[in-house]
Image: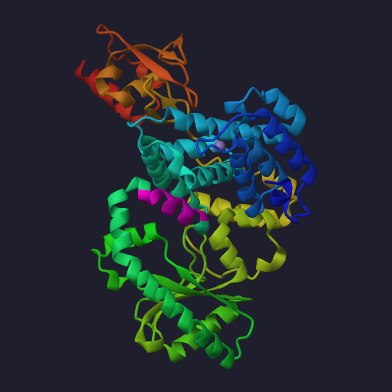
Amino acid sequence: MSVKEITKDRKEIGADIIEKAFNFASLAHEGQKRLSGEDYMIHLFEVARSLSDLNMDTDTIVAGLLHDTLEDTKVTEAEIEKEFGKNVLFLVQGATKIQSIENKESKATSHKTLMKLFLATAEDIRVILIKLADRLHNLRTIRYLPPNKQKRMALESIKIYGPIAERLNMGDIKGEIEDLSFPYAFPGEYKDIINKTRQYFDESKTYAAQIKPKVEEYLRENYINDFKIDSRVKHYFSLYKKLSKLKNNLDAIHDLVAFRIILPDISQCYAVLGILHKKYLPLPKMIKDYIALPKPNGYQSLHTTVFCEDGRIVEFQIRTKDMHEHAENGIAAHWHYSESDKKGTHAEMKELEWVSKIKQWRQASQEEDPKDFFDSLKLDLFKERIFVFTPDGDVKDLPLGATPIDFAYSIHSEIGDRCYGAKVNGKLVSIGHQLKNGDVCQIITSKKQKPSLDWIKIAKTSEARSRIKSILKKG
Ligand code: MN
Protein backbone atom coordinates (compact mmCIF):
# COMPACT_ATOMS: atom_id res chain seq x y z
CA MET A 1 0.00 0.00 0.00
CA SER A 2 1.85 3.08 -1.20
CA VAL A 3 0.86 6.53 -2.41
CA LYS A 4 2.65 5.83 -5.68
CA GLU A 5 0.06 3.16 -6.49
CA ILE A 6 -2.55 5.90 -6.32
CA THR A 7 -0.75 8.67 -8.17
CA LYS A 8 0.93 6.35 -10.69
CA ASP A 9 2.61 8.39 -13.40
CA ARG A 10 -0.10 10.98 -13.55
CA LYS A 11 1.76 14.26 -13.72
CA GLU A 12 -1.38 16.37 -13.77
CA ILE A 13 -2.39 15.48 -10.22
CA GLY A 14 -0.94 16.72 -6.95
CA ALA A 15 1.11 13.87 -5.51
CA ASP A 16 2.12 15.93 -2.46
CA ILE A 17 -1.39 16.75 -1.37
CA ILE A 18 -2.49 13.16 -1.98
CA GLU A 19 0.34 11.96 0.20
CA LYS A 20 -0.66 14.47 2.87
CA ALA A 21 -4.26 13.20 2.76
CA PHE A 22 -3.03 9.61 2.94
CA ASN A 23 -1.06 10.35 6.11
CA PHE A 24 -3.89 12.43 7.56
CA ALA A 25 -6.37 9.58 7.05
CA SER A 26 -3.94 6.96 8.41
CA LEU A 27 -3.60 8.97 11.59
CA ALA A 28 -7.32 9.66 11.93
CA HIS A 29 -8.30 6.01 11.46
CA GLU A 30 -5.38 4.65 13.46
CA GLY A 31 -6.25 1.37 15.20
CA GLN A 32 -9.53 0.93 13.29
CA LYS A 33 -10.04 -2.39 11.51
CA ARG A 34 -12.31 -3.64 8.77
CA LEU A 35 -14.45 -6.72 9.43
CA SER A 36 -11.91 -8.61 7.34
CA GLY A 37 -9.34 -7.86 10.06
CA GLU A 38 -7.39 -5.56 7.75
CA ASP A 39 -6.42 -2.02 8.67
CA TYR A 40 -9.14 0.46 7.82
CA MET A 41 -6.65 2.34 5.69
CA ILE A 42 -6.76 -0.45 3.08
CA HIS A 43 -10.33 0.55 2.29
CA LEU A 44 -9.46 4.23 1.80
CA PHE A 45 -6.43 3.31 -0.27
CA GLU A 46 -8.53 1.12 -2.58
CA VAL A 47 -11.19 3.80 -3.00
CA ALA A 48 -8.55 6.38 -3.90
CA ARG A 49 -6.88 3.97 -6.28
CA SER A 50 -10.16 3.27 -8.11
CA LEU A 51 -10.76 6.99 -8.43
CA SER A 52 -7.32 7.48 -9.87
CA ASP A 53 -7.94 4.59 -12.30
CA LEU A 54 -10.93 6.58 -13.47
CA ASN A 55 -8.60 9.54 -14.05
CA MET A 56 -10.30 11.68 -11.45
CA ASP A 57 -8.84 14.99 -10.34
CA THR A 58 -6.75 15.60 -7.21
CA ASP A 59 -9.63 16.92 -5.05
CA THR A 60 -11.71 13.82 -5.70
CA ILE A 61 -8.85 11.45 -4.88
CA VAL A 62 -8.12 13.38 -1.67
CA ALA A 63 -11.83 13.27 -0.76
CA GLY A 64 -11.78 9.54 -1.49
CA LEU A 65 -9.05 9.12 1.13
CA LEU A 66 -10.99 11.24 3.62
CA HIS A 67 -14.52 10.06 2.82
CA ASP A 68 -15.05 8.25 6.13
CA THR A 69 -13.29 10.69 8.46
CA LEU A 70 -16.33 12.79 9.41
CA GLU A 71 -18.42 9.73 10.13
CA ASP A 72 -15.91 7.46 11.81
CA THR A 73 -13.20 9.61 13.42
CA LYS A 74 -12.76 12.73 15.55
CA VAL A 75 -11.74 14.83 12.54
CA THR A 76 -13.90 17.95 12.17
CA GLU A 77 -15.14 19.80 9.11
CA ALA A 78 -13.03 22.79 10.09
CA GLU A 79 -9.86 20.68 10.10
CA ILE A 80 -10.57 19.28 6.66
CA GLU A 81 -11.23 22.73 5.29
CA LYS A 82 -8.08 24.12 6.87
CA GLU A 83 -5.84 21.33 5.60
CA PHE A 84 -7.41 20.57 2.21
CA GLY A 85 -9.72 23.44 1.29
CA LYS A 86 -13.41 24.07 0.66
CA ASN A 87 -13.79 21.83 -2.37
CA VAL A 88 -12.48 18.73 -0.65
CA LEU A 89 -14.67 19.46 2.37
CA PHE A 90 -17.72 19.80 0.10
CA LEU A 91 -17.02 16.38 -1.46
CA VAL A 92 -16.42 14.68 1.89
CA GLN A 93 -19.63 16.22 3.27
CA GLY A 94 -21.55 14.92 0.25
CA ALA A 95 -20.24 11.38 0.71
CA THR A 96 -21.05 11.56 4.44
CA LYS A 97 -24.62 12.74 3.78
CA ILE A 98 -25.25 9.83 1.44
CA GLN A 99 -23.84 7.44 4.01
CA SER A 100 -26.29 8.74 6.60
CA ILE A 101 -29.19 8.23 4.17
CA GLU A 102 -28.10 4.64 3.69
CA ASN A 103 -27.91 4.14 7.43
CA LYS A 104 -31.41 5.56 7.85
CA GLU A 105 -32.83 3.44 5.05
CA SER A 106 -35.81 1.34 6.09
CA LYS A 107 -37.65 -1.50 4.46
CA ALA A 108 -40.51 0.85 3.65
CA THR A 109 -38.30 2.95 1.40
CA SER A 110 -38.45 1.91 -2.23
CA HIS A 111 -35.14 1.62 -4.04
CA LYS A 112 -36.41 4.04 -6.64
CA THR A 113 -37.02 6.75 -4.07
CA LEU A 114 -33.70 6.01 -2.46
CA MET A 115 -31.94 6.45 -5.77
CA LYS A 116 -33.56 9.85 -6.30
CA LEU A 117 -32.68 10.84 -2.78
CA PHE A 118 -29.15 9.71 -3.37
CA LEU A 119 -28.80 11.73 -6.56
CA ALA A 120 -30.44 14.80 -5.06
CA THR A 121 -28.14 14.67 -2.06
CA ALA A 122 -24.97 14.14 -4.03
CA GLU A 123 -25.21 17.56 -5.71
CA ASP A 124 -21.93 16.97 -7.49
CA ILE A 125 -21.20 14.12 -9.84
CA ARG A 126 -17.83 13.54 -8.16
CA VAL A 127 -19.61 12.63 -4.91
CA ILE A 128 -21.39 9.89 -6.83
CA LEU A 129 -18.11 8.62 -8.23
CA ILE A 130 -16.62 8.51 -4.72
CA LYS A 131 -19.65 6.52 -3.54
CA LEU A 132 -19.35 4.15 -6.50
CA ALA A 133 -15.68 3.51 -5.69
CA ASP A 134 -16.58 3.10 -1.99
CA ARG A 135 -19.35 0.63 -2.83
CA LEU A 136 -17.12 -1.29 -5.20
CA HIS A 137 -14.56 -1.97 -2.50
CA ASN A 138 -17.25 -2.80 0.06
CA LEU A 139 -18.65 -5.34 -2.39
CA ARG A 140 -15.24 -6.82 -3.08
CA THR A 141 -15.05 -7.56 0.65
CA ILE A 142 -18.74 -8.40 1.14
CA ARG A 143 -17.94 -11.96 2.24
CA TYR A 144 -16.83 -10.64 5.65
CA LEU A 145 -20.22 -9.09 6.46
CA PRO A 146 -22.92 -10.86 8.47
CA PRO A 147 -25.53 -12.52 6.18
CA ASN A 148 -28.39 -10.06 6.75
CA LYS A 149 -26.12 -7.14 5.86
CA GLN A 150 -24.78 -8.99 2.81
CA LYS A 151 -28.27 -9.39 1.40
CA ARG A 152 -29.24 -5.80 2.03
CA MET A 153 -26.06 -4.38 0.55
CA ALA A 154 -26.26 -6.67 -2.48
CA LEU A 155 -29.88 -5.77 -3.26
CA GLU A 156 -29.25 -2.10 -2.76
CA SER A 157 -26.24 -2.30 -5.07
CA ILE A 158 -28.20 -3.99 -7.83
CA LYS A 159 -31.17 -1.63 -7.50
CA ILE A 160 -29.35 1.64 -6.97
CA TYR A 161 -25.63 1.59 -7.69
CA GLY A 162 -25.83 -0.58 -10.81
CA PRO A 163 -28.42 1.65 -12.52
CA ILE A 164 -26.51 4.79 -11.57
CA ALA A 165 -23.31 3.39 -13.06
CA GLU A 166 -25.28 2.41 -16.14
CA ARG A 167 -26.75 5.87 -16.59
CA LEU A 168 -23.29 7.31 -16.32
CA ASN A 169 -22.27 4.85 -19.05
CA MET A 170 -19.72 3.18 -16.76
CA GLY A 171 -20.09 -0.32 -18.14
CA ASP A 172 -17.13 -1.86 -16.36
CA ILE A 173 -18.15 -0.72 -12.90
CA LYS A 174 -21.79 -1.57 -13.47
CA GLY A 175 -20.85 -5.13 -14.50
CA GLU A 176 -18.58 -5.59 -11.53
CA ILE A 177 -21.10 -4.17 -9.03
CA GLU A 178 -23.81 -6.49 -10.34
CA ASP A 179 -21.67 -9.61 -10.51
CA LEU A 180 -20.31 -9.12 -6.99
CA SER A 181 -23.84 -8.60 -5.64
CA PHE A 182 -25.60 -11.32 -7.61
CA PRO A 183 -24.69 -14.35 -5.41
CA TYR A 184 -25.85 -12.53 -2.25
CA ALA A 185 -28.93 -10.84 -3.68
CA PHE A 186 -30.34 -13.88 -5.48
CA PRO A 187 -28.41 -16.96 -4.29
CA GLY A 188 -30.70 -19.57 -5.84
CA GLU A 189 -30.79 -17.93 -9.25
CA TYR A 190 -27.06 -17.44 -9.14
CA LYS A 191 -26.33 -21.13 -8.54
CA ASP A 192 -28.76 -22.01 -11.26
CA ILE A 193 -27.07 -19.79 -13.84
CA ILE A 194 -23.60 -21.03 -12.95
CA ASN A 195 -24.65 -24.65 -13.32
CA LYS A 196 -26.50 -24.07 -16.57
CA THR A 197 -23.92 -21.99 -18.31
CA ARG A 198 -20.53 -23.16 -17.14
CA GLN A 199 -20.13 -25.55 -20.04
CA TYR A 200 -21.32 -22.98 -22.58
CA PHE A 201 -18.90 -20.43 -21.21
CA ASP A 202 -15.94 -22.77 -21.39
CA GLU A 203 -16.77 -23.87 -24.91
CA SER A 204 -17.31 -20.33 -26.07
CA LYS A 205 -14.00 -19.21 -24.66
CA THR A 206 -12.13 -21.99 -26.44
CA TYR A 207 -13.91 -21.18 -29.67
CA ALA A 208 -13.12 -17.47 -29.33
CA ALA A 209 -9.44 -18.21 -28.81
CA GLN A 210 -9.41 -20.35 -31.94
CA ILE A 211 -11.09 -17.93 -34.29
CA LYS A 212 -9.47 -14.71 -33.10
CA PRO A 213 -6.33 -15.20 -35.26
CA LYS A 214 -8.51 -16.04 -38.25
CA VAL A 215 -10.47 -12.81 -37.94
CA GLU A 216 -7.26 -10.83 -37.48
CA GLU A 217 -5.75 -12.35 -40.60
CA TYR A 218 -8.91 -11.67 -42.58
CA LEU A 219 -8.92 -8.00 -41.54
CA ARG A 220 -5.29 -7.59 -42.59
CA GLU A 221 -6.04 -9.16 -45.96
CA ASN A 222 -8.53 -6.33 -46.33
CA TYR A 223 -5.94 -3.66 -45.50
CA ILE A 224 -7.13 -3.02 -41.95
CA ASN A 225 -3.90 -3.01 -39.96
CA ASP A 226 -4.36 -0.59 -37.08
CA PHE A 227 -6.83 -2.35 -34.80
CA LYS A 228 -7.18 -4.10 -31.48
CA ILE A 229 -9.39 -7.12 -31.05
CA ASP A 230 -10.57 -8.54 -27.74
CA SER A 231 -13.10 -11.09 -26.76
CA ARG A 232 -15.47 -10.20 -23.99
CA VAL A 233 -17.38 -12.65 -21.84
CA LYS A 234 -20.82 -11.60 -20.77
CA HIS A 235 -21.30 -10.67 -17.12
CA TYR A 236 -23.27 -13.26 -15.17
CA PHE A 237 -25.90 -10.89 -13.88
CA SER A 238 -26.65 -9.42 -17.28
CA LEU A 239 -26.82 -12.98 -18.63
CA TYR A 240 -29.33 -13.79 -15.90
CA LYS A 241 -31.48 -10.79 -16.83
CA LYS A 242 -31.35 -11.68 -20.50
CA LEU A 243 -32.14 -15.34 -19.88
CA SER A 244 -35.19 -14.42 -17.82
CA LYS A 245 -36.47 -12.41 -20.78
CA LEU A 246 -35.78 -15.25 -23.21
CA LYS A 247 -37.58 -17.85 -21.08
CA ASN A 248 -34.25 -19.49 -20.22
CA ASN A 249 -33.40 -20.43 -23.78
CA LEU A 250 -29.62 -20.37 -23.73
CA ASP A 251 -29.41 -21.03 -27.48
CA ALA A 252 -31.07 -17.69 -28.11
CA ILE A 253 -28.17 -15.86 -26.49
CA HIS A 254 -25.62 -14.95 -29.11
CA ASP A 255 -23.40 -12.63 -27.18
CA LEU A 256 -22.15 -14.97 -24.47
CA VAL A 257 -18.76 -14.23 -25.96
CA ALA A 258 -18.47 -11.21 -28.18
CA PHE A 259 -15.58 -9.78 -30.14
CA ARG A 260 -14.72 -6.17 -29.76
CA ILE A 261 -12.77 -4.46 -32.47
CA ILE A 262 -11.25 -1.08 -31.61
CA LEU A 263 -10.25 1.18 -34.51
CA PRO A 264 -8.73 4.64 -34.95
CA ASP A 265 -11.74 6.37 -36.53
CA ILE A 266 -15.40 6.10 -37.41
CA SER A 267 -15.00 5.50 -41.14
CA GLN A 268 -12.86 2.44 -40.40
CA CYS A 269 -15.59 1.15 -38.08
CA TYR A 270 -18.08 1.14 -40.94
CA ALA A 271 -15.44 -0.32 -43.28
CA VAL A 272 -14.83 -3.23 -40.90
CA LEU A 273 -18.58 -3.84 -40.59
CA GLY A 274 -18.74 -4.21 -44.37
CA ILE A 275 -15.67 -6.43 -44.49
CA LEU A 276 -17.13 -8.76 -41.85
CA HIS A 277 -20.47 -8.97 -43.63
CA LYS A 278 -18.75 -9.86 -46.89
CA LYS A 279 -17.44 -13.05 -45.35
CA TYR A 280 -19.84 -13.82 -42.50
CA LEU A 281 -23.56 -13.64 -43.16
CA PRO A 282 -25.24 -11.32 -40.64
CA LEU A 283 -28.41 -12.32 -38.84
CA PRO A 284 -31.30 -10.15 -39.94
CA LYS A 285 -32.41 -7.43 -37.50
CA MET A 286 -29.26 -7.88 -35.43
CA ILE A 287 -27.26 -5.01 -36.95
CA LYS A 288 -27.29 -2.02 -34.60
CA ASP A 289 -25.77 1.33 -35.43
CA TYR A 290 -25.24 3.01 -32.07
CA ILE A 291 -22.67 5.30 -33.67
CA ALA A 292 -25.29 7.14 -35.70
CA LEU A 293 -27.93 6.60 -33.02
CA PRO A 294 -26.24 6.46 -29.60
CA LYS A 295 -28.02 4.86 -26.64
CA PRO A 296 -29.62 7.32 -24.20
CA ASN A 297 -26.63 7.04 -21.87
CA GLY A 298 -24.30 8.09 -24.69
CA TYR A 299 -23.03 4.60 -25.55
CA GLN A 300 -21.68 4.34 -29.08
CA SER A 301 -20.66 1.27 -31.07
CA LEU A 302 -21.65 -0.81 -34.09
CA HIS A 303 -23.06 -4.23 -33.20
CA THR A 304 -23.60 -7.11 -35.56
CA THR A 305 -24.33 -10.77 -35.02
CA VAL A 306 -23.06 -13.09 -37.74
CA PHE A 307 -22.64 -16.72 -38.70
CA CYS A 308 -18.91 -16.90 -38.07
CA GLU A 309 -16.35 -19.68 -38.60
CA ASP A 310 -17.94 -23.16 -38.55
CA GLY A 311 -21.34 -21.50 -38.78
CA ARG A 312 -21.39 -20.48 -35.14
CA ILE A 313 -23.24 -17.35 -34.13
CA VAL A 314 -20.96 -14.60 -32.82
CA GLU A 315 -21.48 -10.95 -31.94
CA PHE A 316 -19.04 -8.26 -33.03
CA GLN A 317 -18.85 -4.82 -31.44
CA ILE A 318 -16.96 -2.27 -33.49
CA ARG A 319 -15.98 1.13 -32.11
CA THR A 320 -13.30 3.80 -31.89
CA LYS A 321 -10.88 4.10 -29.00
CA ASP A 322 -12.74 7.10 -27.58
CA MET A 323 -16.07 5.33 -27.78
CA HIS A 324 -14.52 2.36 -26.05
CA GLU A 325 -13.23 4.48 -23.24
CA HIS A 326 -16.64 6.09 -22.80
CA ALA A 327 -18.27 2.68 -22.72
CA GLU A 328 -15.94 1.52 -19.96
CA ASN A 329 -15.50 4.64 -17.85
CA GLY A 330 -18.47 6.69 -18.94
CA ILE A 331 -18.68 10.11 -17.46
CA ALA A 332 -15.30 9.70 -15.83
CA ALA A 333 -13.77 9.58 -19.27
CA HIS A 334 -14.16 13.36 -19.50
CA TRP A 335 -11.57 14.06 -17.00
CA HIS A 336 -8.86 13.57 -19.52
CA TYR A 337 -10.87 14.49 -22.53
CA SER A 338 -8.80 15.53 -25.48
CA GLU A 339 -9.45 17.36 -28.72
CA SER A 340 -9.60 14.07 -30.62
CA ASP A 341 -13.34 13.48 -30.60
CA LYS A 342 -14.59 16.45 -32.57
CA LYS A 343 -15.53 14.11 -35.40
CA GLY A 344 -18.59 13.16 -33.42
CA THR A 345 -21.82 11.92 -34.87
CA HIS A 346 -24.39 13.46 -37.13
CA ALA A 347 -27.39 12.07 -35.33
CA GLU A 348 -29.77 14.34 -33.53
CA MET A 349 -31.62 12.49 -30.83
CA LYS A 350 -34.18 12.95 -28.16
CA GLU A 351 -32.60 12.47 -24.81
CA LEU A 352 -33.42 12.54 -21.19
CA GLU A 353 -32.70 15.96 -19.81
CA TRP A 354 -29.81 14.86 -17.78
CA VAL A 355 -28.16 12.94 -20.57
CA SER A 356 -28.04 16.15 -22.52
CA LYS A 357 -26.55 17.70 -19.43
CA ILE A 358 -23.78 15.14 -19.54
CA LYS A 359 -23.22 16.14 -23.13
CA GLN A 360 -23.02 19.79 -22.19
CA TRP A 361 -20.44 18.88 -19.61
CA ARG A 362 -18.50 17.05 -22.27
CA GLN A 363 -18.52 20.07 -24.51
CA ALA A 364 -17.72 22.38 -21.65
CA SER A 365 -14.77 20.22 -20.75
CA GLN A 366 -13.20 21.00 -24.07
CA GLU A 367 -13.61 24.73 -23.84
CA GLU A 368 -13.24 25.70 -20.23
CA ASP A 369 -10.50 25.79 -17.72
CA PRO A 370 -10.76 22.39 -15.98
CA LYS A 371 -11.19 24.09 -12.61
CA ASP A 372 -14.34 25.92 -13.75
CA PHE A 373 -15.52 22.76 -15.36
CA PHE A 374 -15.40 20.85 -12.09
CA ASP A 375 -17.16 23.64 -10.24
CA SER A 376 -19.98 23.54 -12.76
CA LEU A 377 -20.54 19.83 -12.32
CA LYS A 378 -23.40 20.26 -9.92
CA LEU A 379 -26.16 17.75 -10.01
CA ASP A 380 -29.31 19.79 -10.14
CA LEU A 381 -31.36 17.02 -11.67
CA PHE A 382 -33.63 16.75 -8.72
CA LYS A 383 -33.20 20.25 -7.37
CA GLU A 384 -36.93 20.88 -7.61
CA ARG A 385 -37.62 17.93 -5.29
CA ILE A 386 -37.04 17.47 -1.60
CA PHE A 387 -36.92 14.27 0.41
CA VAL A 388 -38.35 14.18 3.90
CA PHE A 389 -38.20 11.31 6.38
CA THR A 390 -40.85 9.93 8.70
CA PRO A 391 -39.57 9.18 12.22
CA ASP A 392 -39.35 5.52 11.13
CA GLY A 393 -36.98 6.42 8.33
CA ASP A 394 -39.46 6.08 5.50
CA VAL A 395 -38.83 8.76 2.89
CA LYS A 396 -41.32 10.94 1.02
CA ASP A 397 -40.52 12.56 -2.29
CA LEU A 398 -42.08 16.08 -2.33
CA PRO A 399 -41.87 19.22 -4.46
CA LEU A 400 -39.72 22.14 -3.33
CA GLY A 401 -41.69 24.35 -0.92
CA ALA A 402 -43.77 21.46 0.42
CA THR A 403 -45.20 21.81 3.94
CA PRO A 404 -46.22 19.44 6.75
CA ILE A 405 -49.72 19.41 5.18
CA ASP A 406 -48.28 17.85 2.00
CA PHE A 407 -46.22 15.46 4.05
CA ALA A 408 -49.26 14.42 6.10
CA TYR A 409 -51.35 13.79 2.98
CA SER A 410 -48.52 11.79 1.42
CA ILE A 411 -48.73 9.42 4.38
CA HIS A 412 -52.51 9.02 4.39
CA SER A 413 -55.50 11.19 3.50
CA GLU A 414 -56.96 10.78 7.00
CA ILE A 415 -53.71 11.96 8.56
CA GLY A 416 -53.78 14.94 6.21
CA ASP A 417 -57.33 15.85 7.19
CA ARG A 418 -56.45 15.75 10.89
CA CYS A 419 -53.09 17.49 10.61
CA TYR A 420 -52.73 19.97 13.43
CA GLY A 421 -49.03 20.68 13.48
CA ALA A 422 -45.69 18.95 13.13
CA LYS A 423 -42.35 18.36 14.71
CA VAL A 424 -39.48 18.89 12.29
CA ASN A 425 -36.14 17.55 13.50
CA GLY A 426 -37.66 17.51 16.98
CA LYS A 427 -38.93 21.13 16.93
CA LEU A 428 -42.59 22.16 16.83
CA VAL A 429 -43.58 23.98 13.63
CA SER A 430 -46.81 25.23 12.08
CA ILE A 431 -48.58 23.38 9.26
CA GLY A 432 -47.38 26.03 6.81
CA HIS A 433 -43.68 25.55 7.60
CA GLN A 434 -41.44 24.96 4.56
CA LEU A 435 -39.77 21.56 4.71
CA LYS A 436 -36.16 21.08 3.67
CA ASN A 437 -34.30 18.22 2.07
CA GLY A 438 -33.38 15.59 4.68
CA ASP A 439 -35.78 16.84 7.38
CA VAL A 440 -37.32 14.30 9.72
CA CYS A 441 -41.00 15.20 10.11
CA GLN A 442 -43.50 13.90 12.61
CA ILE A 443 -47.15 14.87 12.11
CA ILE A 444 -49.30 15.85 15.06
CA THR A 445 -52.99 15.13 14.55
CA SER A 446 -56.12 16.22 16.36
CA LYS A 447 -59.54 14.62 16.04
CA LYS A 448 -61.14 18.08 16.05
CA GLN A 449 -59.05 19.31 13.12
CA LYS A 450 -60.44 19.54 9.59
CA PRO A 451 -59.30 21.12 6.31
CA SER A 452 -60.04 24.82 5.80
CA LEU A 453 -59.84 27.20 2.85
CA ASP A 454 -56.35 28.52 3.67
CA TRP A 455 -54.96 24.98 3.46
CA ILE A 456 -55.21 25.19 -0.32
CA LYS A 457 -52.61 27.97 -0.28
CA ILE A 458 -50.38 26.01 2.08
CA ALA A 459 -50.51 22.73 0.15
CA LYS A 460 -48.11 22.26 -2.78
CA THR A 461 -48.89 18.76 -4.01
CA SER A 462 -51.86 18.09 -6.27
CA GLU A 463 -52.65 15.07 -4.12
CA ALA A 464 -53.18 17.25 -1.04
CA ARG A 465 -54.98 20.06 -2.90
CA SER A 466 -57.55 17.86 -4.58
CA ARG A 467 -58.32 16.07 -1.32
CA ILE A 468 -58.74 19.37 0.54
CA LYS A 469 -61.01 20.73 -2.20
CA SER A 470 -63.22 17.67 -2.20
CA ILE A 471 -63.60 17.81 1.58
CA LEU A 472 -64.44 21.54 1.44
CA LYS A 473 -67.07 20.89 -1.24
CA LYS A 474 -68.77 18.34 0.97
CA GLY A 475 -68.82 21.04 3.65
MN1 MN B 1 -16.23 3.87 2.98
Decide if residue 246 is on the left or right side of residue 301: left
- Residue 26 visible in the displayed image: yes
Q: Which residues are magenta?
A: 173-183
Q: Nearer the viewer, residue 246 or 3?
A: 3
Ligand 1 shows up in which quadrant of the image? top right
Q: Position of residue 239 (x, y in %)?
A: 36, 62
Is 96 one of the magenta-colored residues?
no
- Residue 469 visible in the displayed image: no
**Residue shown at 34%/30% (left/top)?**
462
Q: Nearer the viewer, residue 104 or 326?
A: 104
**Residue shown at 31%/49% (left/top)?**
187
Give the quarter of the image for residue 337. Answer: bottom right
Q: Nearer the viewer, residue 32 or 22?
A: 32
Taken as a whole, is the magenta stretch helix, strand or loop?
helix
Location of residue 178 with respect to 59 vertically, above or below: below
Q: Nearer the viewer, residue 150 or 381?
A: 150
**Residue shown at 50%/29% (left/top)?**
100
Outermost front residue: 37
Location of residue 369 with respect to 197 vertically, above or below: above
Is 182 one of the magenta-colored residues?
yes
Q: Position of residue 9 (x, y in %)?
A: 75, 56
Outermost left residue: 474
